[in-house]
Amino acid sequence: MSKLVNNLIRDGYLKSDLIIDAFSEINRIEFVPKELEAHANENIALPIGFGQTISQPMTVAIMLELLDPHRGHNVLDVGSGSGWTTALLSYIVGSQGKVIAVERIGELLKLGQKNVDKYGYVTKKIAEFYNIDASKGFSEKAPYDRIIVSATVPCVPEELKEELKIGGKMVIPVGHSLWYLEKKRENEFHKEEYPGFAFVPMAEGRIL
């Protein structure tokens, strides 16, 4: 187990066995630019090109612990970037689950897909990648047990709420806070807000 993972456990950010196993199995160094590999195990966000970043490990740990993914889940990963979160989720959901990774920047999508398949998850059809603008959801593969968004939005898209199963959970940055949403009934959500986070904004519009 790496020093980074041990520190995240020690500081209380990583708690669940399955998520800890995912962090131990999926090495962040595989998802950062070559020139930044020396910093891969530091608890900082790193640039991955196109104005995007790979999130701080602490932030990803917090998001995944809130998301509470399990084996066999169907998960929508919005803003998959270089693929680290997609790979972590693919490990967690396992062979009976599915991770739908969507990324609007075509070159990043290709990079993320290549990175994730270093672990065989694309070949095994656990992870699927789509070059789309998911700011209005992705109904083709809905409904989802879990939805995670890695870019900040001014408000939660109604389409994402609709695509979440009853009992499903979503973690999404809204402004400078992380929002946790749990769908209790068709139009009823439990919400918790955790302030003090910074994400790149979700870009809408044409596919790049």
Image: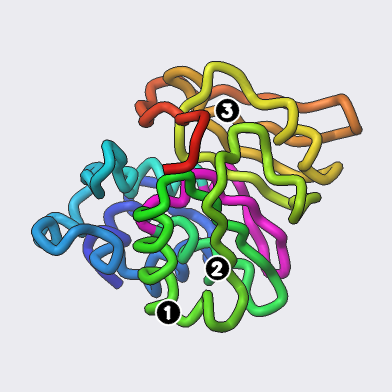
Q: Secondary structure at mark 3?
A: strand
Q: Residue at x 64, y 45 (%)?
A: 147
Mark 1–mark 2 CB contact (< 8 Å) = yes
Q: Residues within 10 Å of mark 1 (few under 14, many from 20)?
A: some
Give the Cα distance between marks 1 and 2: 9 Å
Q: Residue 98 lies in what quarter of the image?
A: bottom right
Which of the pair 93/31 is nearer the observer?
31
Marked residue nearer the N-terminal end (1 or 2): 2
Q: Residue 167 lies in what quarter of the image?
A: top right
Which of the pair 33/43 is nearer the observer?
33
Where does label 2 land, which residue?
90
Q: Hey, what amino acid is under mark 2?
A: Ser
Q: Residue at x 36, y 54 (%)?
A: 108
Q: Residues within 10 Å of mark 2 (few under 14, many from 20)?
A: many
Magenta-colored span: 64-82
Q: Nearer the viewer, mark 2 or mark 3?
A: 2
Which of the pair 46/9 is nearer the observer?
46
Q: How many marks?
A: 3
Q: Hey, what amino acid is under mark 1?
A: Tyr
Give the Cα distance between marks 2 and 3: 22 Å
Q: Secondary structure at mark 1?
A: helix
Marked residue nearer the N-terminal end (1 or 3): 1
Where does label 1 land, which residue?
119
72 part of magenta stretch: yes
25 part of magenta stretch: no
Q: Is residue 170 left or right of residue 166?
A: left
Give the Cα distance between marks 1 and 3: 30 Å
Q: Hey, what amino acid is under mark 3?
A: Trp
Query: x, y (%) of residue 182?
Result: 74, 35
Where does label 3 land, which residue?
179
